């Protein structure tokens, strides 16, 4: 019957999807926090690179993956502090600072990688996070493959999202973040420290982005290469918009974009398919453009003061 | 009238005593010059005054938004140092501002608890909050749904949320800043009823307003401020609108600018039944009709916020409006023409020179040509003729006596007065038939003020039709041939400066219609 | 011009130029610290870089060649940034220009040289201009934030290029992802053999001068600048804000597209997938460094070209990874940004 190869095809696509979407999920959820507070960080790409390299270097040197992850998070915090300092305290233009971060991220990681690792003596691979097959559930036909045979960092996203949503919508802290991005003056009047809230949001954003970058070396691939992030930081920006600045929206959008990504990879190896794979590659970006156009009518819109410094 | 709050502290009836409050702002604005205020517990106390009288600043000081240069505040018989709104709120002082401090995308309940809980507190037991809000809602007949998103509420409802915010956290003193400015007449009625209810329950209310009707209707006592000083505090029952108006406005309005007798000629500009909504979509100009003739200055007097800004913006083509008819130079103006009335013989001196009149990092010369840069002689085949521009700028600077170091320097380096002179010079030099002037002397020094006013008169003498909008009564009186008073978007009456009494103008500015003289 | 006016002009120039002049040493110093911590000798590294860039005629011409696309993109961005349009899409506009010019260069290859060369360049400019105007249209009509839209359009342009060079325009099916070479008649003159220095560099300089004149000496430039500083005041004065935004993006995209055309017509002679190794982003640094002044872009473009070129040699000879140069670029931008705010703050204090 013709159905079986199609099902297998679908299964392999979907199985890859969650894994491929994971770094974007981390980065996008982080950026949701940042943008909700009013700060647009287009430098996520650079932050992810720095996180990836830091994670790799630490894990390689210490032989301990968790240590690598922690180091990545630390690098994210430092990146966030620097970004916040320039955009919130100095009140410099957020776009410019973000662009600078991308350059610095690329340059610094490329330089350090070449300096310390490229003249490889011996293997550069890490023993990455292994796939954990959830007992019993992973034996379910189709869904077992798709959902229950991933590594821990992928599984972690399913915990991250509800946590992020909870923090953003159901804690006083999250409420303050939303207020600060919508109507900072009102927040100021009730005693909320606008600058502090924005600093924290930026740091959350960049820490998560760094984790996303670390995932690429600690679980997805098994080593660092220059430019390993290859545009995922920018996709995360699109995900935030498409997902309506919400953690769950970011999650589903990342998965959706992940499907396209997995599809286009597969199609590249399949001759005779009529759709050029580049079309699928471009689809997420096209879709985001359409969403942006439609936003003018919808109730969901960007936080009011996104990109505008607070005096 | 020196108040000594320290001595009154043992009188429990006096809940608030503000003594000798001084507050100045950079740029030389002296908002409060020794203001005294005494408020009795449980009363509704109105703060009455024109623009710039200092009412909002005084209350902002009480609420912790500003710190006074000097003076003291006694609340509930204790001296208070209030450094920020949190301090005020902790002392059970609450304020409802003109521009609501609400986060639109959050619900009513979320707005009310914003900033009140420690950050890690989860909001899962919002049911308690909801219940309390519902309870208060029913108690006061407020009809507020705690789960509704603020952006879905009407303006009146949003205001109720602001008030609820104050009451929820407990207040003994509630300040409201011109609360009826954004409400319909019916909503205003409801609000006033509500406030009376609250006062009956023991809450003390300070109500800032410039509307005499409200003062008479709702207050127990009223304090009149003028020019940053306290004029008097009276029992409402013992006074009347005329007396209040006189105290509110009562300067000797004479500024002898040697105004020539007006001989107005043809009608240059007319508009019938103009309606303008403000940026929020609320009606700001509600059916205004008037005409302006050659060689005449028509002044529009009124407290700011009654539609003047919107009127000017509509005529400048920057705000959407509706009208039955409009003519300029006997030519009928349709909506499309409105966006370039400049080309049809109208000039406009805007009320905010830095936002609308000038381009700040540009040089003085460049600012002179902002409307004419495309035409000869300033441009030839697309190229700017710098020499001609500079010469033009130099000639204007000389003619209008503008203090400038170098016409090619940044215009931001000029003083406010000189910046305004640039705008005035630029607009007048176009020899307009119709000139719209909005707050021409706001924020500028005496010398520049006199100069600008003389220019306006000179322009009028050479045949221009001038519409002058100003909240400065002295200016209106000095320059106008006819005065229209605007209140809540409508013309309350038309008067001749020589014939009018101060009280009458004050009454009209504060809401009472007077039959045409 | 007398001595006094000369003095004031000089003072004015220094006041605006001190920022980039100070930012470069600061960025290099931080770079030196990084080098040292990584175990390299900064002096050795930087002198290798300098040598690599300026040692001899061949080296210098390489610098100018690398500077050419940076100057094209940089001057275009100068116009957009002056209009306060954050065009992050120069990369995509470069690509579309390259696509258009390659197509013309191949399919109209039979035309004589004096017709084909201008046609190729015009096609490139048009391709980039249209791509840029798309973002402007979305902003004008739908209020779409140009930062996000231009980033999206970048990727779409790159994928369109990818599709073309692996599909319809591929040279040999199934082989390398590149187009055939453009016709001989379409190629730009390399006027200094045996170096690769080509007339495109001159065109870039000329464009920089033209755009400088446009921005500062014409009425069009006046309105673009006015809209960039204060769109409300501009609108009130009768300036059509939307039209100026469209125009600024057309010029910006056109310049980038022209850069793409020149890259194809003078260096690569064909289109392939990585025709731009990130020039669009470097261009941002190039323009910001000189406060969005097209004449200044000539110098910052050459500076960054030197950094790029020198860093390659530095990698070969001193074994210092060339990626350092990106970091230095980013640090330069941050320094400029920090100074810019500093001078604003001190100005406010004066008043």
Image: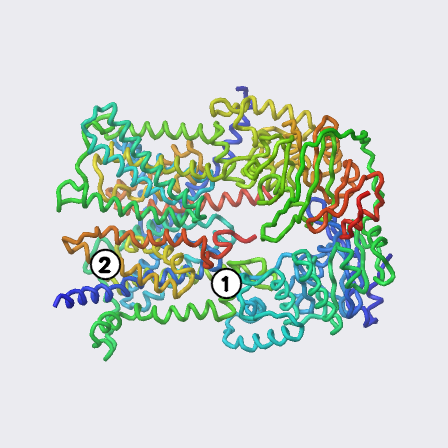
Where the C terminus of chain B falls, by quadrant? top right
Give A180 or C335, whichever is nearer the viewer.
Answer: A180
Give A171 or C100, whichever is nearer the viewer.
Answer: C100
Task: Give the residue displayed 48% in from the left and 46% down from the top.
Answer: C338
Where the N terminus of chain B falls, by quadrant? bottom right
In the rendered structure, the answer to whether residue B167 lies left or right of residue A84 reads right
The location of residue A161, given as percent across then percent down, is 38, 68
Q: Is residue A68 visible?
A: yes
In the rendered structure, the answer to whether residue B489 lies left or right of residue A301 reads right
Residue underneath mark 2: A263
Work out how far the residue at label 1 is from the one at label 2, CA to CA, in angstroms: 37 Å
Residue underneath mark 1: A177
Query: Which is nearer the N-term, disc 1 or disc 2?
Result: 1
The location of residue B216, given as percent across then percent down, is 80, 60
In the rendered structure, the answer to whether residue B466 lies left or right of residue B322 reads right
The location of residue B77, given as percent across then percent down, is 78, 70
Res B364 → quadrant: top right
Q: Is residue A226 above or below residue A62?
A: above
In the rendered structure, the answer to whether residue A104 lies left or right of residue B248 reads left
């Amino acid at each position: 019957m013709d159905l079986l190869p199609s099902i297998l095809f679908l299964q392999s696509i979907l199985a890859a999807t969650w894994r491929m979407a994971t770094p974007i999920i981390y980065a996008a959820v982080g950026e949701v926090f940042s943008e909700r507070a009013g700060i647009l960080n287009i430098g996520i790409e650079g932050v992810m690179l720095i996180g990836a390299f830091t994670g790799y270097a630490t894990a390689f040197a210490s032989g301990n993956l968790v240590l690598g992850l922690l180091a990545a998070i630390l690098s994210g915090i430092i990146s966030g502090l620097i970004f916040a300092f320039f955009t919130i305290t100095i009140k410099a233009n957020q776009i410019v600072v973000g662009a600078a971060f991308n350059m610095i991220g690329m340059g610094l990681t490329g330089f350090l990688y070449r300096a310390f690792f490229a003249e490889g003596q011996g293997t550069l691979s890490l023993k990455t996070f292994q796939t954990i097959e959830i007992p019993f559930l992973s034996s379910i036909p189709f869904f077992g493959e798709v959902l229950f045979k991933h590594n821990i960092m992928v599984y972690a996203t399913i915990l991250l999202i509800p946590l992020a949503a909870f923090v953003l919508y159901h804690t006083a802290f999250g409420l303050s973040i939303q207020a600060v991005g919508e109507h900072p003056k009102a927040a100021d009047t009730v005693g909320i420290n606008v600058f502090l809230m924005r600093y924290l949001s930026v740091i959350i954003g960049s820490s998560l982005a760094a984790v996303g970058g670390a995932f690429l070396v600690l679980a997805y691939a098994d080593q660092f290469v220059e430019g390993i992030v290859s545009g995922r930081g920018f996709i995360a920006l699109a995900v935030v918009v498409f997902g309506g600045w919400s953690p769950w929206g970011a999650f589903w959008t990342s998965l959706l974009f992940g499907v396209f990504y997995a599809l286009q990879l597969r199609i590249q190896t399949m001759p005779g398919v009529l759709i050029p794979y580049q079309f699928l590659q471009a689809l997420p970006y096209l879709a985001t453009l359409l969403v942006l156009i439609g936003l003018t009518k919808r109730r969901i819109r960007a936080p009011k003061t996104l990109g505008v410094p607070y005096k | 009238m020196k108040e000594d709050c320290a001595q009154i502290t043992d009188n429990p009836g006096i809940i608030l005593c503000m003594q000798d409050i001084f507050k100045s702002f950079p740029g030389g604005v002296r908002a409060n010059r020794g203001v005294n205020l005494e408020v009795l517990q449980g009363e509704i106390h109105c703060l009455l005054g024109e623009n710039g009288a200092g009412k909002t600043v005084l209350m902002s000081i009480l609420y912790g938004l500003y710190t006074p240069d000097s003076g003291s505040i006694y609340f509930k018989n204790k001296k208070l140092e209030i450094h920020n709104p949190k301090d005020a709120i902790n002392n059970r002082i609450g304020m409802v501002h003109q521009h609501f401090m609400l986060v639109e995308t959050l619900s009513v309940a979320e707005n009310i608890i914003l900033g009140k809980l420690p950050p890690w507190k989860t909001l899962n037991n919002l049911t308690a909050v909801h219940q309390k809000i519902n309870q208060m809602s029913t108690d006061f007949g407020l009809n507020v749904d705690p789960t509704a998103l603020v952006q879905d509420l009407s303006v009146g409802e949003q205001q109720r949320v602001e008030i609820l915010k104050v009451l929820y956290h407990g207040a003994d003193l509630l300040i409201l800043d011109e609360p009826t400015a954004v409400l319909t007449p019916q909503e205003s009625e409801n609000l006033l009823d509500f406030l009376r209810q609250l006062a009956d329950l023991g809450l003390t209310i300070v109500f800032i307003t410039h509307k005499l009707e409200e003062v008479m209707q709702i207050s127990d006592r009223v304090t009149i401020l003028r020019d940053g000083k306290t004029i008097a505090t009276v029992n409402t029952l013992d006074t009347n609108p005329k007396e209040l108006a006189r105290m509110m406005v009562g300067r000797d309005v004479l500024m002898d600018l040697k105004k020539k007798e007006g001989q107005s000629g043809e009608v240059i500009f007319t508009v019938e039944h103009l309606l303008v909504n403000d940026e929020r979509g609320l009606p700001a100009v509600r059916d205004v009709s008037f005409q302006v003739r050659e060689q005449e200055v028509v002044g529009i007097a009124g407290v700011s916020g009654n539609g003047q800004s919107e009127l000017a913006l509509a005529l400048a083509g920057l705000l959407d409006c509706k009208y039955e008819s409009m003519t300029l130079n006997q030519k009928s103006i349709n909506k499309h023409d409105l966006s370039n009335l400049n080309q049809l013989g109208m000039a406009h001196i805007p009320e905010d020179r830095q936002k609308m009149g000038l381009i700040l990092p540009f040089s003085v010369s460049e600012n002179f040509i902002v409307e004419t840069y495309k035409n000869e002689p300033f441009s030839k085949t697309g190229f700017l003729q710098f020499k001609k521009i500079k010469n033009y700028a130099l000639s204007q600077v000389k003619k209008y006596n503008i203090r400038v170091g170098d016409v090619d320097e940044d215009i931001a380096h000029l003083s406010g007065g000189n910046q305004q002179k640039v705008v005035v010079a630029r607009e007048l030099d176009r020899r307009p038939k119709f000139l719209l002037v909005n707050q021409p002397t706001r924020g500028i020094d005496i010398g520049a003020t006199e100069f600008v006013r003389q220019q306006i008169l000179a322009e009028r003498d050479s045949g221009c039709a001038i519409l002058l909008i100003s909240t400065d009564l002295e200016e209106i009186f000095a320059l106008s041939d006819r005065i229209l008073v605007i209140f809540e978007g409508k013309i309350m009456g038309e008067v001749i400066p020589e014939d009018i009494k101060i009280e009458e103008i004050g009454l009209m500015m504060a809401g009472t219609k007077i039959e045409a003289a | 011009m007398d001595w006094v006016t000369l003095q004031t002009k000089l003072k004015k120039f220094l006041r605006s130029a001190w920022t980039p002049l100070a930012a470069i040493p600061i960025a290099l110093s931080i770079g030196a610290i990084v080098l040292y911590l990584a175990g390299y000798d900064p002096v050795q590294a930087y002198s290798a870089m300098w040598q690599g860039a300026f040692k001899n005629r061949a080296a210098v011409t390489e610098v100018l060649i690398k500077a050419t696309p940076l100057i094209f993109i940089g001057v275009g961005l100068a116009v957009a940034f002056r209009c306060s349009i954050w065009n992050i899409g120069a990369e995509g506009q470069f690509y579309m220009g390259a696509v258009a010019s390659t197509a013309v260069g191949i399919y109209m290859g039979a035309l004589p040289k004096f017709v084909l060369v201008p046609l190729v360049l015009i096609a490139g400019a048009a391709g980039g201009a249209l791509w840029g105007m798309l973002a402007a249209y979305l902003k004008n009509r739908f209020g779409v934030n140009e930062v996000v839209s231009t980033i999206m359009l970048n990727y779409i342009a790159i994928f369109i290029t990818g599709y073309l060079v692996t599909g319809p325009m591929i040279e040999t099916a199934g082989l390398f992802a590149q187009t055939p070479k453009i016709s001989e008649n379409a190629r730009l003159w390399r006027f200094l053999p045996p170096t690769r220095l080509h007339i495109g560099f001159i065109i870039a300089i000329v464009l920089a001068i033209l755009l400088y004149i446009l921005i500062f000496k014409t009425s069009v430039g006046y309105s673009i600048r006015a809209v960039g500083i204060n769109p409300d005041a501009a609108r009130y004065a009768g300036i059509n804000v939307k039209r100026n935004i469209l125009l600024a993006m057309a010029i910006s995209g056109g310049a980038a597209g022209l850069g793409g055309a020149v890259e194809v017509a003078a260096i690569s002679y064909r289109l392939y997938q990585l025709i731009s190794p990130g020039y669009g982003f470097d261009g941002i640094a190039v323009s910001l460094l000189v406060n969005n002044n097209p004449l200044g872009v000539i110098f910052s473009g050459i500076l960054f070209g030197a950094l790029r070129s020198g860093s390659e040699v530095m990698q070969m000879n001193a074994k210092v990874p060339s990626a350092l140069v990106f970091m230095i670029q980013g640090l330069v931008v941050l320094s400029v940004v920090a100074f810019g705010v500093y001078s604003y703050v001190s100005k406010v204090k004066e008043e």
